Image (cartoon, coloured by chain):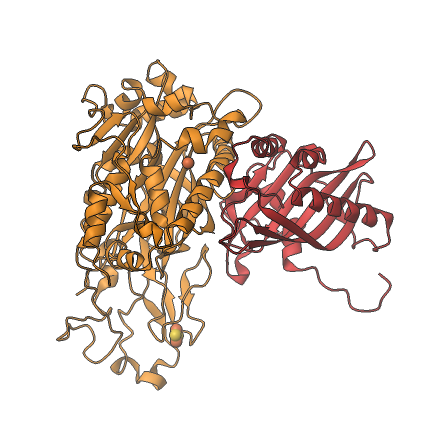
Chain colours: A red, B orange
Amino acid sequence: MSTDLPQAPPSAAVTAITDPHPVPAGNPTGDDAQTLSEQSVLGRHASRVQRVGASLPFDDPRHLQAHHWLVDEAWLLDAQAYEDWLELITEDVHYLMPVRVTTALGAGYDTARGMAHFDEDKYSLSRRVARFLTEHAWTEDPPSRLRHHLSNVRTFATDDADHLVVESATLLFRNRGDVREGSFISAGREDLLRLVDGHWKLARRVILVDDSVMRMQNLAIFL
Amino acid sequence: MADQTTVLADVRRGMIPAHVYNDREIFELEKERVFSRAWVFVGHESEIAQPGDYVVRRVLEDSFILTRDEQGEVRAHFNMCLHRGMQVCRAEVGNASHFRCPYHGWSYRNDGRIVGLPFHKDAYGGEAGFQRKGQRLLPAPSLATYNGMIFLSMDPDAPPLEEFLGDFRFYLDYYTKQSASGIELRGPQRWRVKANWKIGAENFAGDMYHTPQTHTSVVEIGLFREPKAEKRKDGATYWAGAGGGTTYKLPDGDLDERLRYVGYPQEMVDRMKEQFTDDQLKVIGDDGFMISAASIYPNLSFVHNWPRVGESDDVLPFISIRQWQPISEDETEVLSWFAVDAEAPEEFKALSYKAYLMCFGSTGMFEQDDVENWVSLTNTAAGSMARRLLLNSRMGILEDDEPVVPPLGPDAFHGPGEARTGYSEHNQRALLNRWADDLEKPPVQAATLTVGGPGAGAQDAAGRTSPSANDAELPGGAVAQA
Ligand code: FES
Ligand SMILES: [Fe+2]
């Protein structure tokens, strides 16, 4: 960036997703795990491509493509067009949403060890989507009214021209019926996008939710 | 407070006044009479495996630091500073040899004893004014463990935990003691649902009847082969001691074949054969029943299922332990843990965890539809019409209270308690009858405790004591009070 303002330090939440940090003792995935995806129980198959350098300028074509991809995706998720959404996902995807825990400042971790809300591969995501397509997924019949508000998009290059790392914030509002007020989920996300046959696809997503106790009746949604 | 005599009498004859699922006065009574005396699950020893490890857990509004002290002993300290009542520990998990209160800096060893009191001499005149020696964070009134599962009771005179659990221990072992090492507990996922806490407890205790309807979608996507209606009907439903649950009928085969049918690898089967009693093995091998969901009164539930976890047809079993923690008459915090035998192969642990995530917990495909039902039920129970409606909870008994299906004889079912096949609500009634018994009993009178006041350590005229007695030496962290 060309300004002479001091470079803002990366936020703690962002750092926690990709930057190396101490692995909590007793983590079931071993000592060499660094990122949350690596530390997760089911993330062994996941791509390990990481960001390189500072965020790309907002007029960089790669940023524009990534941002475009995220807005399109948010629309699909709002519309519960989950079959189309699955088409945007690679076969080796790792879709992870750790459980956040409240820990002391110096603890070195703020996610539960060996537990997540989502720790998914393509098979488990496809089962979840298939279930919504049956006529018997009662929790979404009648369907919720969903809105994924997307912001704070930053795109990073990687060592591989076919991969981009994209960060974003998402605020999901979900409302059902007419008795209860709607509920929110606020989360930061770090995605790995991969160029496959000329289309960007999601190869890895880590969702760092801002609640330790979810205030939603279930997570029959995607973030 | 309204007289609940009629409500309880209706419950006892299997007719449930619908408003008990969303009623402020009933909830106040439950706080006073159910959760003030029952043994309530707070965690498992594997969650605090090392000295200094702690987790913070609640019983209703009361926060406890559950920790393993430097001697390896499990303790539960009321999470309130003895000085002016600040919450001592504000993290929910960690490792600490000491807890220092952020307000004025009193500090406590992880066994609860005070070690630091700033300006003790200047502020209090030293030991002469405030006897620091022997003072400790207030221990839970009663604390005990079974198979590493840690329970608290707010009643200092609670019956022993094993007595409370009674014959349900036979079934608890299937979930928590598949080898000599017992389970590792991971999680919990926590989330709040706008549903009354009793609904989940009743459902897991014995609602085999909802499975084919509520969980149709999970069968349709090929995840689960069991919930077909006839499969549920053939399973045995048992009630024993403080809890009860449902089972599935397994296809023909011997013990090993039947355990492998639900996905246990032979080495785990071999360990179960060493660990379980003859009767525990016979329920599976001879009688052909495999545990599924269960509840212990008042608010702890279990589930054991065996879904597919990948493209192959193989299934894999998982265990979840969950607590329906009451927040109010229409809100419950669900704490859902994944449990796995500590000696299981690593690959099994990972796939069992995957099975858990797909089926239960905050994202689980079974749980999603359960919760939707329970929230709607709770909403509907709030109004005046629900006060006019007695729900029929008499499935499995005739008008004269005779059972539709007789209990299984000792040759057909080798477990303790009463078991029978077929659809029924025997267990929901058993759970709510216990609840009615508690609501009828006068509340537990809790003793008041003072901290280092005049005459500390002695019992005063009102029967109150200070926590400065030599309680740090008492075993198990449990301290008799007043
Ligand atoms: S309240 Fe804890 S030191 Fe004062
Ligand atoms: Fe269910």
Q: Residue at x 42, y 48 (%)?
A: B335
Does the image show residue B187?
Answer: yes
Ligand 1 shows up in the quarter that is bottom left
As rendered, which of A183 and B102 lies closer to the eye? A183
Residue B20 in the image: state x and y as whole percent: 31, 51
Quadrant position of residue B124: bottom left
Quadrant position of residue A191: top right
Q: Residue at x 60, y 42 (%)?
A: A96
Q: Residue at x 70, y 35 (%)?
A: A84
Q: Is residue B480 left or right of residue A71?
A: left
Residue B178 in the image: state x and y as whole percent: 35, 31
Q: Is residue B243 left or right of residue B217?
A: left
Residue A137 in the image: state x and y as whole percent: 52, 35
As rendered, which of B445 and B342 lies closer to the eye? B445
Callout count: 0
Q: Is residue A162 left or right of residue B318?
A: right
Does the image show residue B42?
Answer: no
